[in-house]
Image (spheres, helix red, strand yellow):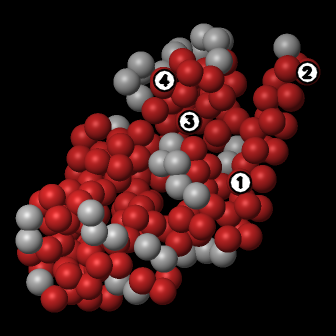
Amino acid sequence: MTTESREHMDDDELVARFRLDPEEFTAVYDRYFREVYLYVAGRLDVQAGEDIAAETFCLAFRDRERFDPTRGGVRPWLFGIATNLMARHRRKEARHYRALARTSADPPADSHEGRVVDTVTAQRMGPRLARALATLNRGERDVLTLSYLAELTHQEVADALGISYGTVGSRLNRARKKIHQSMAKEDNRG
């Protein structure tokens, strides 16, 4: 099958094809690698993005027979794999946020935190935002970043993390409240 004809296929047809012919899995890679890579690189760093995105597709290829389209689409399935692979980086990520919060140094410009700080607010917001993000638990951080960084819908986030749609909404609400409360405390102190 040509690359052009694969581009016009919906995910259900892609799944049916790659189950019959493993060579067809390349269409899944071609369609979603960049999105998964950008999500992981945005959460971690460029090198980790490359490594985890590649590992995501290796695992997806290995487990392609177990993919269950009734639990969601290919895209959320891939993002769920990537999110699970990032779990081993969680402690490092949390320590990084806490370290940023303890210093007044700006985060590196090419990091996710650097881009968020540059985009969201003025220069002095960096340590405040880092402290606010450090208040989130793993589940809240996952939902927040999948929603805003990867731009997944609530249902896609639910599928990716293997949680209910309602849990996505409640975690997102809690994350927003915690960030707002943390920022408000800092405003009242300042």
Percent x, y of residue 67:
35, 83
Residue at the farthest right position: 188
Q: Residue at 43% of width from left, 73% of height from top?
A: 73
The residue at which mark 2 appears reads as 188
> What amino acid does circle 4 point to?
Gly
- Residue 56, position as x, y percentages in the image: 28, 63
Mark 1 belongs to which amino acid?
Answer: Leu
Asked if the residues shown at circle 1 and circle 4 are in contact, with their CB atoms under 8 angstroms apart, the answer is: no
- The answer to which image quadrant residue 104 occupies is top right
Q: Residues within 10 Å of mark 3 (few under 14, many from 20)?
A: many
Identify residue for label 4.
Answer: 114
Q: Nearer the N terminus, badge 3 or badge 4?
A: 3
* SS for dot 1: helix
Q: Specify which label sits upstream in the sequence, 1 or 2.
A: 1
- Label 3 element class: helix
Q: Looking at the rendered structure, which numbered label has been put on residue 97?
A: 3
Choose mark 1 or mark 4, whichever is in front. Answer: 1
Amino acid, disc 2: Asn
Does residue 88 appear in this view? Answer: no
Say which label, 3 or 2, has the lower sequence index: 3
Q: Residue at x 35, y 43 (%)?
A: 38
* Figure quadrant of the N terminus: bottom left
